Amino acid sequence: MDITSDSHSQHISRQFNQELEELKTHLMAMGGLVEKQVQDAVFALLEGDTRLAEQVRDNDRQVNDLQLQIDDECTRVLARRQPAASDLRLVLAVIRATSDLERIGDEASKIARNALLLSENSSTIRGLVEVRHISEHVRKMLRDALTAFARFDTDLAMQVVREDQLVDDEYSSAMRSLMTFMMEDSRSITSVLSIMWVLRALERVGDHADNLAEYVVYLVKGLDIRHSDTDDLDPKVLKKS
């Protein structure tokens, strides 16, 4: 059975309703935190803001603590309520989503660490244009995936899934360009390698946003599309009810 944003407010137990709503609320709070972590890490890199980079690196513990808190809440719901059907899918989707959000936090921390390394480099840094462009793309994917989760919006979720291939193409193009530049100027190897690690981290953020969007489809439709070709999926099945 498909679900809507109102489906989890129809239980006999008010406490059960509240527990499910708290799971969603806490997941959105974690999502907002990791989204800001990525934004701040990229800004610190582009602007050479070492204090902000250190803050992002240090805040990673807060992301980890939120994951542990939400996982504990999900475990209690499973043990006490033994949810079924769409309620069970919601709890499972939240558990999966927190894992991806925690990994996005890790990627933000990697970007911050590379920002600190690059701040010690006085020469012109190549690849910042690519970092800015891809970061804007994956941050929009992440924001849309979280919005889709909050609204149970499968149309928006599928848009995120389809965007992931575009990010992969942009990443591959940027890496080829940087490899060529590095071969032409050996003095740039250290800084270019750092930028490559940043681009890799951003590409992984896009992958995790894609995962979040796939969980929305699972939550709403009961379909696991993680290993499916999006071109082969029946649009009638995925269409919002």
Image (cartoon, helix red, strand yellow):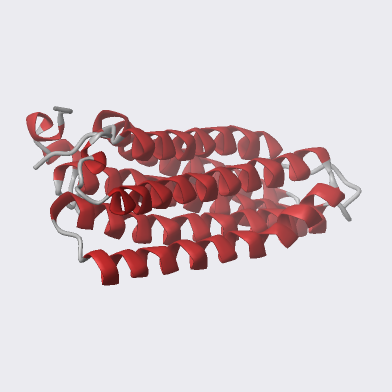
Q: From the viewer's side, name the closer residue of 222 and 235.
A: 222
Determine whether, in the image, residue 123 is placed left or right of residue 21: right
**The C terminus, quarter of image:** top left
Residue 69 visible in the snapshot: yes
Question: At 53% from the left edge and 54% from the top edge, which residue is drawn?
Answer: 104
- Up/down of 38 relative to 68, above or below: above
| Residue at horizontal 15 percent and vertical 58 percent from the top | 84
Quarter occupied by residue 82: bottom left
Q: Position of residue 15 (x, y in %)?
A: 33, 53
> Quarter-wise, where is residue 120 in the image?
bottom right
* Nearer-the-camera pick, 85 or 161: 85
Question: Looking at the picture, how far across and down is residue 133, in whole percent?
Answer: 59, 32
Residue 160 relative to residue 233: left or right: right
Q: Is residue 238 above or below residue 92?
A: above
* Left or right of residue 177, residue 224 in this image: left
Q: Residue furthest right?
A: 122
The quarter of the picture where residue 117 lies is bottom right
Determine whether 207 is above or below 113 in the image: above
Quadrant including the N terminus: top left
Residue located at (70% from left, 58% from top): 59
Report how many numbered discs are placed on residues in the image.
Answer: 0
- Which residue sits at x=44%, y=58%? 98
Relative placement, left or right, of 120 versus 38 is: right
Q: Is residue 222 above or below residue 83?
A: above
